[in-house]
Structure formats: structure tokens, C-alpha cells
Amino acid sequence: MKIGIGLPNQTRDVRSAVIPEWARRAEEAGFSTLGSVGRIAYPGVMDTVALAVAAGATSRIGLLSTLLLGPVWPPVLLAKEAASIDGVSGGRLTLGLGLGGRPDDFVVDGLGARGTGKRLDRDVETYKSVWRGEVPDGCDNPLVPAGTREVPLLFGGGVPASFERVARSGQGYIGASLPPAMIGPAFDGVRAAWQAAGRQGSPYLVAIAYFAVADAEAGTSSVRDYYTTAGPDAAELLASTVRGGAEAIKEVVRAFEDLGADELILNPTSDDLDEVARLADVVL
């Protein structure tokens, strides 16, 4: 199982200037991937911006949005953003997409929080059309350079429709920030949908988990704050998943490896740059 690390782009009041150095340190340490967290209505850094900055600061490490909220974006605009990040990175982006569950993230007029599943399915077709160089209605030119590749897609979500979306349109699945025992059934559901769709090989399965090496209490408080608008029960559940200290982090790595995850992205709970080296000492 590969081990990646998230960017701290959605920790409250993140010091935005740490993101390029975080990315450089993560690549030097040997992490497989840099992840980003998607949220609009929170005082962080936009995930597309964080990934673009990370692309410019590195040359080898993978880039993955975990998860970008697809339906909050006009699809043509997101298709160009993603192709641009992938291009400047030399083809290192994988686009992880989710529906979004908090109404305050839907800030674009006409793109509300209803019907997001069907909208994302339509949007995916638009992304792929743009990446093929087809000219959208109302435009005089293709939106991307010739030779642009189709950016690999992973999808999140915990219902059968999400698993079917993976099998129909994606290369794999990203589990939610939940304990391994709660993610196992989702992994099984994705595998079953993949097989039922007649796809060859296996879906790429990504797990994510929050970590805090130096200060577990502060990390738990940070995650609770991030999820406050999801309601107190959800906020407490997700805060309780923060893995604090070396042994707890090693335990979650083993648990996701036992589930058959292909990659685990460990997401930070602070923008403390020293957490990159601390985590590397534990898991790499």
C-alpha cells in the first residue's frame, strides 16, 4: 500500500505560504502523493490552487484531490482547471470528485445543492469532451492544448450510485474520513459494481485518515471545527477519527492495508511544517 500525505489547505486560517514548502518536503521524504481537501465556505486555500502550487514546487510526487466538490463548479471551467494543473505538473494529477453535502459550499448561481448526482454524471461527460479538445457550445476554440490527456477520475460517496459511478466513469474510489471498519463495506461495494459492469482489472481504492503526530488534542479540535456545520454528531464522529501519535497512526495504516487499500492519504490537522518529517518517520 502506498502512503501519501495531504496538504494543509483546509486547516482553519492556514498560513497559505507554507503550502509550497510542505509539498517540497513531502516529495523529499518519499510520500507517494499530495492530497488536497475541497471546501468553499471555510477559511482555507482553494484545492485547485493548492494543487497548482504543489505542482510547481515538485517534480515527481502524485497529486490527488480528496475530494474536490465537482457539482459546485461550472463543468467547463473545472475541466480546464484540472487539465491545466495536470499539464503543468507533467501528468501527475488524479481528480478525486465528490458531490458535496453542505449547502454553503454551493456559491455559484444556478448550481444548487439538489440533484448533484445526476449533475455530476453529466459534468463528467463535459470534462472528457473538453479534454478531447472538442469545442464547447458558444466557444470559438478548444479550451485545452492539443495533446491534453484525459485526467484520471476517482469518485467518493457511500451509496450504491456512487459505486456504480466508479464502475461506469472512473478508475477507482476514495473512501470517506471514517474508521476502517466503516470503509470496508464501501470498498466491497465498489469491487462488486466494478465486476458487475464487466470492467477489467480492479478499481484503485484510496483511503484517507486524519493524523496529528505532535499534538493529538489540537488535531482533534481542528477536525471538529472543520465539520461543525455538518452537525454536532457528525463533527464528534469525525473528530474522534484523528490518529494521534505514532502507534495510533501505525495502527490505521495496518487496518487499511488489511482492507486492501491501494493507497492511504494521511491528512494533516495543522499547518506545522515539521509534521511532514514526523509523519515520514512513523510510516515510511
Image (cartoon, rainbow, N blue to C red):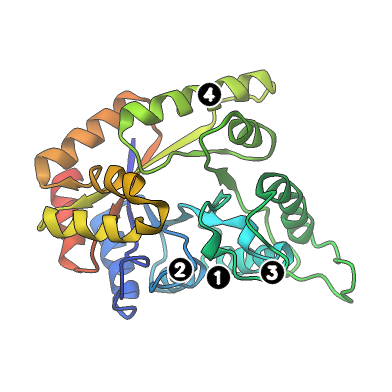
- At x 15%, y 66%, the residue is 274
Vertical placement of 187 versus 24: above or below? Answer: above
Amino acid type at mark 3: Leu
Label 1 sits on residue: 88
Task: Identify residue for label 4.
Answer: 189
Q: Looking at the image, is 201 positioned above or below residue 97?
A: above
Q: Nearer the viewer, mark 3 or mark 2?
A: 3
Give the tally of numbered discs: 4
Nearest to N terminus: mark 1 or mark 2: 2
Task: Provide the residue designation for mark 2.
Answer: 55
Tell me: residue 129, above or below residue 12.
above
Q: Please state the horizontal and vertical placement of residue 232, each as a whole percent of the image.
A: 32, 50
Label 4 is placed on what type of residue? Answer: Gly
Say which quarter of the image contains residue 227: bottom left
Task: Look at discs 3 and 1 and give the one toward the viewer.
Answer: 3
The disc, 1 or 4, on the residue closer to the chain's N-terminal end is 1
In which quadrant of the rendered image does the N terminus lie? top left
> Mark 2: which amino acid?
Ala
Q: Could you tell whether 218 is left or right of 91 in the image?
A: left
Check whether the beta carbons of the residues at disc 1 and disc 2 lie within 8 A of each other. yes
Label 2: which secondary element: helix
Label 1 residue SS: helix
Identify the mark nearer the N-term, 2 or 4.
2
Of pointers 3 and 2, the one earlier in the residue sequence: 2
Judge from the rendering whether residue 105 lies leftward or rightward of residue 37; answer left or right.
Answer: right
Residue drawn at (44%, 39%) of the image = 175
Residue, disc 3: 77
The residue drawn where x is 56% and y is 50% is: 97
Quadrant including the C terminus: top left
